[in-house]
Image (cartoon, helix red, strand yellow):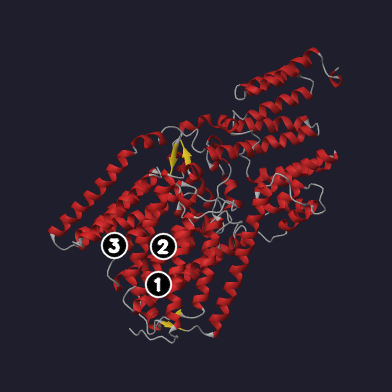
């Protein structure tokens, strides 16, 4: 192998600094730093951090890029080349056949984490780190640097984890069943568990290797201390599935370690080391046994944050109103809910030949998944009470997003890549542990940005160590430079748009006094795949000159949230202008929603209110009744049926409806008293 380069002496320094910077930004800052102005599930700050890091990666690649020998592809064989071509074509077709190609390319305003813009950033980071490790390989230091960086990441993660849980948890803690759960900068213990599970598996393998191979006392002690710290952090997420998959990963790593050893004595050492490490973790877990017991009680208060948001979205006043809708939740475990979500995803994937072969598209689940929602989700206080952003399984989600062709192609490609790589390099169990943890935990989770970045870092390191080259590094040719510049500009514009939109949302949601019309109008003009900023304009300024234009756009959208906003805004205009034509437009929007998803009681209840507004009692009543069929404890519909009865001059019937609502909301007593007064003194229209 030749290590010849055609670069100046300055380039190695730039590449080395760039690689270290990329690591710091994507795997140190991105997990733990969140800006409160970023509102989309605190994912936007991570997206922006990673995308900015990709920009620096592009700058690095403008100076020097990896170079592959043509013989490499000949050695890889036709099967690998065919699998790669098949996979690429399948992914392209998945996007072309997407329910929304634009959303699949540019994303749905950062709410999901799978679109071509993010993959472009990932690709830039992969090639940048590949170049970084190639440079280090020239000095035989790539292995030392890789493991040092991951050890540093584990140290920082432990410090942040313990700090969050024991020091600043009042501001960042995620409360479930009264138990504070470690969530890191992800703001969600499930995502934190995925990240920590990968680091735990890596450190488990490191501690195991140091013990069995009789490393220095200092090295063995250091890896053991880190193992204790990362085990504590993982346990503090109180995420049972994460612990289950950590156990699965440990078993796989143990088997591989035993297979690697040739003597019985060495294999016994592996078993002893694993026993000691698992005992340590068991002792730590024993300290938190009461919290784990509390987490396993009922699901009614599974997430106060989610309950409050849902109750407000369907017209409630707060958590108490939301809780009343989920009294049946205790009958279901979180495992039951996860299985139902998987069933939902599989049903969506198998729904049409297009979905089966090509999926719904990388970021188009918003448009397709609601069509196949089961009414059973009306019982649960989870995000599934509305519509999911993804199915919580890497594999089912892959099938839903990309279909069988791209999923099978990528699986075959990975198999042959692994087979080729592990015949070219000595197996490093810690790298295998990292990858096994990622794919094992994928059974229960859909990976976040930072977990994906960890895998990209690992693959870049593997590529630098395993592949043969005629020339490791070279200057990019003019065509490559032009392509890199296009990528740089595209990413820059995308980042700018996303960041500006998030700052806009912060102002629009947090300001007590609405901003001026011109300001809101300027925000609404931002080119996004999600119409969220247009919704603010039509809500705050229903008579603005652009409102009707935006309402027309929203009412023609495939996004159910756009349709709901349009329906509500038309209803507001109807009341402001006393114009029934706006009510008709609102009803049309709700009918479009029902043509996609007819399982939400709130949708039927809202439709009934529109009919009630125009005195169309014959259509209003069945809409309210349908809401109650879907969810018998949906007390809003009882209240509205009571109002309908009063408008039909049937106060006694209204009282019966109000009493049914009173079982769930005591304040219905006020309406009962009003109806009783109407029996004694009928209003003029009922005399």
Q: Is residue 41 left or right of residue 245?
A: right
Instruction: Mark 3 vs mark 1: give the one in front.
Output: 3
Q: Is residue 503 left or right of residue 234?
A: right
The reply to whether callout 2 and callout 1 are in contact (CB within 8 Å) is: no
Q: Is residue 557 visible?
A: no
Q: Is residue 410 visible?
A: yes
Q: Residue 143, which numbered label?
A: none
Residue 253: image location, x then y, percent? 28, 57
Residue at the spot of label 2: 455
Marked residue nearer the N-terminal end (3 or 1): 1
Say which element carries label 3. Answer: helix
Residue in the foreground of this view, choosing between 142 and 296: 142
Q: Circle 1: is it few (<14), some (14-19), or many (20+) Cα within 10 Å?
A: many
Q: CA–CA distance between discs 3 and 1?
A: 24 Å
Instruction: Mark 2 vs mark 1: give the one in front.
Output: 2
Q: Quadrant of residue 210?
A: bottom left
Image point 74% across, 26% down: which residue? Answer: 643
Q: Is residue 594 left or right of residue 459?
A: right
The reply to whether callout 3 and callout 2 are in contact (CB within 8 Å) is: no
Quarter of the image that includes the N terminus: bottom left
Say which element carries label 1. Answer: helix
Q: Is residue 677 above or below residue 338?
A: above
Residue 587: image location, x then y, percent? 75, 41
Q: Circle 3: is it few (<14), some (14-19), or many (20+) Cα within 10 Å?
A: some
Residue in the foreground of this view, choosing between 154 and 521: 154
Residue at the spot of label 1: 80
Marked residue nearer the N-terminal end (2 or 1): 1
Residue at the spot of label 3: 429
What is the residue that sits farthest to the top in this orientation?
Answer: 680
Residue in the foreground of this view, choosing between 235 and 157: 157
């Amino acid at each position: 192998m030749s290590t010849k380069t055609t670069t100046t002496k300055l380039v190695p320094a730039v590449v080395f600094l760039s690689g270290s910077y990329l690591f710091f930004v994507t795997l140190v800052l991105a997990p733990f730093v969140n800006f409160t102005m970023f509102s989309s599930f605190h994912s936007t700050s991570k997206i922006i951090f990673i995308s900015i890091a990709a920009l620096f990666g592009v700058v690095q690649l403008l100076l020097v890029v990896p170079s592959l020998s043509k013989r490499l592809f000949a050695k890889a064989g036709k099967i690998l080349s065919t699998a790669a071509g098949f996979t690429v074509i399948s992914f392209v077709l998945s996007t072309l056949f997407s329910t929304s190609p634009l959303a699949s390319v540019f994303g749905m305003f950062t709410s999901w984490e799978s679109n071509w813009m993010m993959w472009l950033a990932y690709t830039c980071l992969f090639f940048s780190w590949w170049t970084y490790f190639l440079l280090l390989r020239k000095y035989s230091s790539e292995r030392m640097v890789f493991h040092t960086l991951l050890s540093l990441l584990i140290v920082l993660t432990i410090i942040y984890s313990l700090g969050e849980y024991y020091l600043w948890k009042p501001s960042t803690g995620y409360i479930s069943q009264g138990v504070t759960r470690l969530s890191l900068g992800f703001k969600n213990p499930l995502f934190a568990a995925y990240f920590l599970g990968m680091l735990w598996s890596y450190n488990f393998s490191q501690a195991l290797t140091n013990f069995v191979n009789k490393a220095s006392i200092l090295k063995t002690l250091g890896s053991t201390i880190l193992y204790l710290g990362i085990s504590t952090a993982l346990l503090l997420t109180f995420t049972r599935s994460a612990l289950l998959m950590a156990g699965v990963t440990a078993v796989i790593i143990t088997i591989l370690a035993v297979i690697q050893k040739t003597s019985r004595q060495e294999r016994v050492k592996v078993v002893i080391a694993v026993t000691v490490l698992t005992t340590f973790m068991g002792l730590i877990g024993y300290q938190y046994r009461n919290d784990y017991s509390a987490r396993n009680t009922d699901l009614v208060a599974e997430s106060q944050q989610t309950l409050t948001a849902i109750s407000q979205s369907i017209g409630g006043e707060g958590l108490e109103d939301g809780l009343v809708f989920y009294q049946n939740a205790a009958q279901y475990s979180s495992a039951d809910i996860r299985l139902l979500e998987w069933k939902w995803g599989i049903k969506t994937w198998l729904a049409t030949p297009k979905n089966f072969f090509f999926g719904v598209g990388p970021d188009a689940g918003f448009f397709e998944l609601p069509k196949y929602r089961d009414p059973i989700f009306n019982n649960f206080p989870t995000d599934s009470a509305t519509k999911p952003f993804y199915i919580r399984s890497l594999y089912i989600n892959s099938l839903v997003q990309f279909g069988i062709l791209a999923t099978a192609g990528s699986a075959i490609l990975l198999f042959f890549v692994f087979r080729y790589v592990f015949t070219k390099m000595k197996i490093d169990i810690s790298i295998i542990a990292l990858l096994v943890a990622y794919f094992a935990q994928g059974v229960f989770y859909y990976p976040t940005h930072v977990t994906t970045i960890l895998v990209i870092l690992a693959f870049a390191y593997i590529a630098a160590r395993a592949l043969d080259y005629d020339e490791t590094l070279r200057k990019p040719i003019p065509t490559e430079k032009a392509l890199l510049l296009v990528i740089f500009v595209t990413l820059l514009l995308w980042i700018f748009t996303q960041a500006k939109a998030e700052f806009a949302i912060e102002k629009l949601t947090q300001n007590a006094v609405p901003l001026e019309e011109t300001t809101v109008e300027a925000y609404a003009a931002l080119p996004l795949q999600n119409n969220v900023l247009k919704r603010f304009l039509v809500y705050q300024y229903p008579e603005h000159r652009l409102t009707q234009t935006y309402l027309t756009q929203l009412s023609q959208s495939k996004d159910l949230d756009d349709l709901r906003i349009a329906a509500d805004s038309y209803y507001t205009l109807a009341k402001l202008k006393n114009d029934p034509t706006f009510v008709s437009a609102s009803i049309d929007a709700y009918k479009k929603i029902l043509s996609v998803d007819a399982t939400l009681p709130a949708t039927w209840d809202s439709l009934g209110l529109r009919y009630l507004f125009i005195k169309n009692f014959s259509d209003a009543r069945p809409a309210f009744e349908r809401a109650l069929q879907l969810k018998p404890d949906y007390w809003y519909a009882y209240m509205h049926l009571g109002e309908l009865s009063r408008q039909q001059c049937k106060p006694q019937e209204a009282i019966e409806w109000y009493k049914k609502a009173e079982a769930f909301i005591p304040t219905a007593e006020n309406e009962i008293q009003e109806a009783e007064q109407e029996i004694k003194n009928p209003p003029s229209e009922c005399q």
